[in-house]
Amino acid sequence: MAEAYTKSWHFPRTDLARGYLKALVDGAASLALFAERRKGKTEFLRDDLKPLAIKEGIQVCYINFWRDRVSPENCVLAGVKKTLEESLKTGLSGLQKELSLNLGVVSAKLSSQQQPQLSDAITALDEVIKHSDRTLFMFDEIQHLATSDRFLPFTASLRTFLESEKGSVRAVFTGSSRDNLDRLFRLHKAPFFNAASLVPFPDLDAAFTTFLVKRFEYLSRRSLDADVLLSIFVSQGFSPAYVVELLQFMNNSGVYELGEGKRRYDELNPPDLGAKQSWESLNALDKELMARFELSPEKSLYTPETYTELATKLGTKVTKSAIQNGIERLRDKGLIWREGRGIWRIENQQLSAIVRDEYEPSLLNGERF
């Protein structure tokens, strides 16, 4: 059998997928996985967990809630449509007619000028599970459902569906916002409170970068320093997307030295551009709050001392309500998450680094914070 690195850039995480699947088969109704964006969650679902589940005779339906950020119903219909299309290709001959009819109904709903209704989405989910004794739903970017109250009826109906079919249905949720995942799963009044076991989605390690070195050498017939690539991987917050895209760029451009390849790639694709844009969009108070969350997260925000410090820095009166409004603005932008009572953290590692670059030099020079 050919080595995996000769086939694609995908690094197989079979053991991780097997562990998650075993937990689901052994009785866990749902799992919720968190990792920042560009950590490989979607690729893992698609290329590791899904094939393994299918091999075990489990039907898989993948639904991405970022496909249509206005209509989760559309996201469900699109995912169901793809599942029915796959089932039509591989299903038993006796099911072909029914599958074709169901696929036709779902396709018509998607192509209609009218937005699908909540009932259309739940009916589509019901249609999927008719054709298999066991179904695994993969709900990618589930945290998007916490961004608006208008999604509450959909979220409640989705939970009801999953609980009513728990004998034959399992679910994996993934999210890239800790704050919004908490709003869905951890708060006492959350729509999915106690509905899923929150489990870690671990970072990749040196085995991954070694795999990439072999892949690059296989394609280019040129060697790379595995230690240097690992150092780059760590410096980019363990983002597999970054290093894969870097090596693809180098291979396509005929660049065979990592330092030079990274310099050229970063000129075309600044790795912290999104974080910089987020930082520059903030007002002065919100930047000060971000600095406190990064550098002294356990220091109370709501004290006369803090109000005075902020007022001195900003040149304007700062009140409790002003700080509360600032926190809500930052939450709405997906920049912070609540670690504990009164303790906030920055969601994105690149944004954390920007805050430190901005504020740590002044602290070293003796300024109060």
Image (cartoon, grey):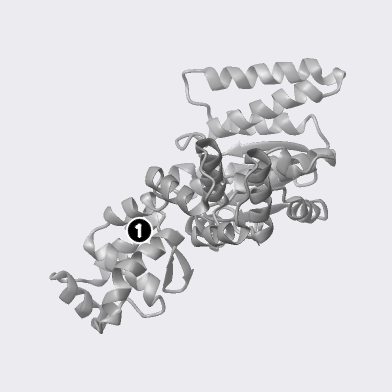
Q: Residue at x 26, y 67 (%)?
A: 321
**Does 230 appear above or below 364?**
above
Counting from the top left corner in percent of width and height, residue 143 is at 52, 50
Quadrant of image for the N terminus:
top right
**Does 21 appear above or below 79?**
below
Q: Residue at x 83, y 55 (%)?
A: 26
In the current view of this chain or complex, which residue is farthest to the left?
A: 315
Circle 1 residue: 330
> In the visual, does 36 lie left or right of 196?
left
Counting from the top left corner in percent of width and height, residue 227 is at 60, 62
Q: Residue at x 54, y 62 (%)?
A: 231
Query: What's the amino acid at mark 1?
Result: Leu
Identify the secondary structure beneath mark 1. helix
Q: Residue at x 81, y 51 (%)?
A: 25
Counting from the top left corner in percent of width and height, residue 157 is at 59, 42
> In the visual, does 113 lie left or right of 286?
right
